[in-house]
Image (spheres, coloured by chain):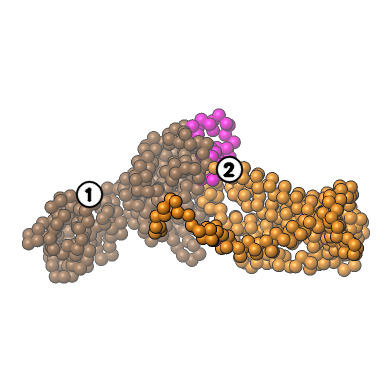
Amino acid sequence: MTATPIPATYRRPLRQRLAVTLEPWLYCAPVLILITAVMLVPLILGISYAFRDIQLLNPFSGGFVGLEHFKTLGQDDAFLRALRNTLWWTGASVFFQLAFGLILALLLNVPFAGRGLAQSLVFLPWAVPTFLAGLNWAWLFNPVIGPIPHWLFALGLMDEPSNILADPSIAMWGPILAATWWGIPFFAITLLAALQSIPKDLYEAASIDGASPIQRFFSITLPYLAPVIAITVLLRTVWVANFADLIIVMTNGGPADRTQTVASYIFTQAFKRLDFGYASAVALVLLALLLAYSMVILVFRQKLSNRDK
Amino acid sequence: MATMEIRSASKNYGTIRVLDDINLEIGDGEFIVLVGPSGCGKSTLLRMIAGLEEITGGEIRIDDKVMNALPPKARDIAMVFQSYALYPHMSVADNMSYSLRLRKTDKPTIAEKVRAASSKLGLDALLERKPKALSGGQRQRVAMGRAIVRQPKAFLFDEPLSNLDARLREQMRAEIRKLHRELGATSIYVTHDQVEAMTLADRIVAMHGGHIQQVGTPLDLYDRPANLFVAGFIGSPGMNFLKGNIADRQLHLHDGRSVALPETMPATMGDATLGIRPEHVVLSPAGSDGLEAAVELVEPTGHGIILHLTLAGEVFKVLTHDRVWLEPGPTVCVSFPEEALHLFNAEGVRV
């Protein structure tokens, strides 16, 4: 830089100083305006709904109600049940997706003829629109047109070929099965990528050290995959917890609210009962829960990777 | 400790034969170095001994037991990899004790063996560290520690020093030699570095193109290379070759000049190659006896000077320790002591 020395007593004129101060902001302005317009404004607007009475069917609504919605929420049994269902739905879906995704990734990591084709076919469910997947599974469970109840009946697992989506005690398994089918590829893709980055000579060293295939899996594969598993499980959990499509399409939350999750409850409140204020309040609670969950996982992961150093 | 025997072993990848008719006997406690350029099959042979590659044909025996069908863990060998292959999430101590823990050795024994190995290798202060917190040389030591804790029948080394810098390589070379003297374990060591081969080996196995070219002590290979490949591969800078044909006990070069051959060599032979090591060539100023050669380049290495000459259209190198040759002038004369000459026939085999 070539700078002319400035005498200590010299002060630039006000306009010049102002220009210097504002200059960096000017450069940032396009991005800041964009972020504010497309992210912050809708977010704040959405949050503000939670504290207002907004019902589409009531032309006089729209007023500020403070924490009224949250008080109602605390006594809303349907909401509490939805919360329990969400835990169950998310936990089971993510667990089965992870388990089968891992098995699939391990199988696809072994060289065999036609592996390239198998790899691309396996990822097909991911490309199916969730709405279509939901309808498809709903029909598969329907004894009138679908084969699954008849198979279960033939295997002796069912007294008569009935629709499990209509049985309150087991209805949740329907959407969980569909979500598992739909979500396996996601885990398979990410875990396969991670598996392929494990150096082959580690396995060779372990086999010379005397490790059986199972011991090799637990002492090399799993530790290597752990960080990837942690981050994909985190992502998937948030995703599945927010994921209402399959439930809305397959059961609509029924029978008797047995498959109602928080996400589908929000959908029902907003678009069936048209109570946007209450739906926003529920959404805000879900947001807080998921944020807390993410924090816990991130701290946990940080601890894990610190231990490695 | 063990003896090893490889009988007409071969290896195919698909239809490509990468190792052909390998025969080798290794004595108890011997340090064998497999040396050759990349792609000569030396690593494949080592991996076949380890059980990491299937054996296409022939037999590999350890202590007179055929190993062909046995998995690596049943062969009781240890291997040090070029990449070290340390388990990244285990501490140094855990890395070393992994094989013992798999064998359900009791804890006091494990602790004692790890302590013995780590003190032998100077790893005491590092036992709790993870591999990624170690330098290259330290990782190399851990890899060796992992091999020695369980006292296997044989050690296999797959180019273990190639990822280290020159200084460290020199140091680790000496340590491996010392370690071998202490443990006395049968060892097979793969390298493409002929200096490593010369300094470490009891016997060198020189390989090229999937075949064993020569087996012998380092000085055997240096003094009496069996063929042109071994002659050119062992020694640095490499041996000089003069091509021509032999008549009247003289090698007639392509440029019309000739080199007199000693009594011990045949008087007529047709096409032949004469070899002489750069360090055995005698230099004299231009105009003296011997062949005149143009000086292309003078390379001082500190402990010597390498002259790059052109003789009969070929590169010809001379290693001298006399500093008067730092400024040799445009040409010099070279002559060859009789006992330093190597003669190879048209097939490249030593005569």
- Three-letter amino acid code at disc 1? Gly
Q: Which residues are magenta?
A: B86-115
- The residue located at (73%, 54%) in the rendering is A238
**Residue B343 visible at all:** no
The answer for how far apart the CA atoms under marks 2 and 1 are is 48 Å
Looking at the colours in the rendered structure, which chain would you say is drawn in brown? B
Q: Chain of mark 1?
A: B
In this view of the protein, which residue sits in the foreground, A260 or A152?
A: A260
Give the image quarter of residue A149: bottom right
Depth check, front residue: A65 or B59: A65
State the quadrant of the N terminus of chain A: bottom left
Mark linked to residue A306: 2
Side of A201 where A106 appears, left or right: right
Query: Helix or strand or loop: what does disc 2 sit on?
Result: helix
Q: Residue at the location (17% across, 58% down)?
A: B265
Which chain hosts label 2?
Answer: A
Looking at the rendering, which quadrant does residue A27 occupy?
Answer: bottom right
Horizontal side, residue A4 vs residue A294: left or right:
left
Name the residue located 53 percent from the left edge and 49 percent from the top edge.
A202
- The quadrant in which the C terminus of chain A is found is top right
* Residue matched to label 1: B302
